Amino acid sequence: MSKRINFDNITIVLHQPRYPENIGSAARAMRNMGISRLVVVDPPNYDLNKAMKLATHTGSDVIDKSKICTDLKDALAPFHYVVGATARLGGQRQVINNPSKLAQKLAPISIENRIAILFGPEDRGLSNEEIRYCHALVNIPTAEFSSLNLAQAVMIICYEIFTTGLEKNKEFVPRLASRHELDGMYDQLKDILVRISYINSENPDYWINNLRHFFTRLKLCAKEVSMIRGICRQINWYGKKCYADGQKMLQNDVTREPEEF
C-alpha cells in the first residue's frame, strides 16, 4: 500500500488549553490515530501529572515529546500550512471545510510540507486575529448543540486524517512557504502599500486581510514569497530614489543664481 499521508508532518497545536486533562485526552486520541506531534501554546494551568493521567500509557510518549510555547506566532512559524478548527461560522470565516474534505486536501500537502492543525481555548475558540494565521478552516458539523470537548474534536479530525491515509495518493504538492516566511511577506507588503497610499493607514490590517485570503488560495511556495518581497524592496528603493532626486533638484533650484535679462 502506497503512503498517502506523512504523519510525521502533521502536528496538533493546542492554543491556551484551560485544562491539563484535556491535553492528556487529546494526546491519547492523537496516538490512537497515528499522530504523535503535539505543541501546546501558553497553557494557563499546565500540570504534567494531570495531563499524563488522562493520556494513559497509550499517549504518554506524545506528552513526553510535546513542545510548550509561549507565543502563537512563534509556535506556528515553522509550518508551511496551518488549519484552524472553528465552531463559529460567518464573518471572516466564510470558506470552511468539513473534517473529511479537509483530510483529502491535507493528504498531498503533507508529503513535502509541515502542517499544523490549530485548536483554540475551550471556552472561546480561535479569535479573528488568530485565524489570520490559518490557510484553511475546519468545522465539525453537529446537531443543535455545537460545543465539543477539545479531545473529542481532536479525535474526529485525527480519525479523518488517519482513514484518508489508507487510500492511494493521486496528487503532489511541492514545499510551500512557511508561516514565518509568509508573515514576513505580509508585514513588508503592509508597510510598502501604506507608504505608497494604496491601503488606508488608519486600518491597514483590514485591507491586508484581503490580500491574505488571495495569497492563501494560491498556496505560495518559498520562491514565490521571495519574489514578492524582492518586488517590495525594489518599490521601496525606487521610492527613496525618486524622493532623493526631487530633493536634489529642489536644492539646485534654490542655489542657482538668477538669470540676467
Image (cartoon, rainbow, N blue to C red):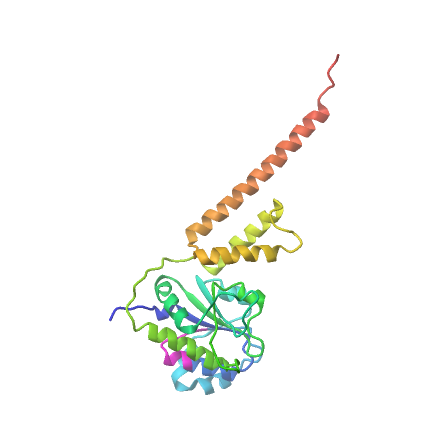
Quick check: 198 left or right of 117?
A: right
Residue 186 vs residue 128, the one in the foreground:
128
Please tell me which residue is depicted at 59% across the width and 36% down the height of the picture: 241
Q: Quadrant of residue 88?
A: bottom right
Residue 163 on image: x %, y %: 34, 75
Report the span colored magenta.
Answer: 29-38
Q: Quadrant of residue 125?
A: bottom right
Residue 73 vs residue 93, the one in the foreground:
93
Residue 98 vs residue 52, the one in the foreground:
98
Q: Quadrant of the N terminus?
A: bottom left
Residue 165 on image: x %, y %: 32, 72
From this view, report whether residue 21 is shown above or below residue 95: below
Q: Quadrant of residue 176?
A: bottom left
From this view, report whether residue 128 is shown above or below residue 51: above
238 is within the stretch colored magenta: no
Please indicate, yes or no, whether residue 63 appears anywhere in the rendered image: no
Please tell me which residue is depicted at 42% across the width and 73% down the height of the picture: 99
Please tell me which residue is depicted at 38% across the width and 66% down the height of the picture: 105
- Residue most extreme to the front: 144
Residue 124 on image: x %, y %: 58, 76
From this view, report whether residue 185 is shown above or below residue 122: above
Q: Quadrant of the C terminus?
A: top right
Residue 128 on image: x %, y %: 57, 66
From this view, report whether residue 3 is shown above or below residue 250: below
Please indicate, yes or no, whether residue 199 appears anywhere in the rendered image: yes
31 is within the stretch colored magenta: yes
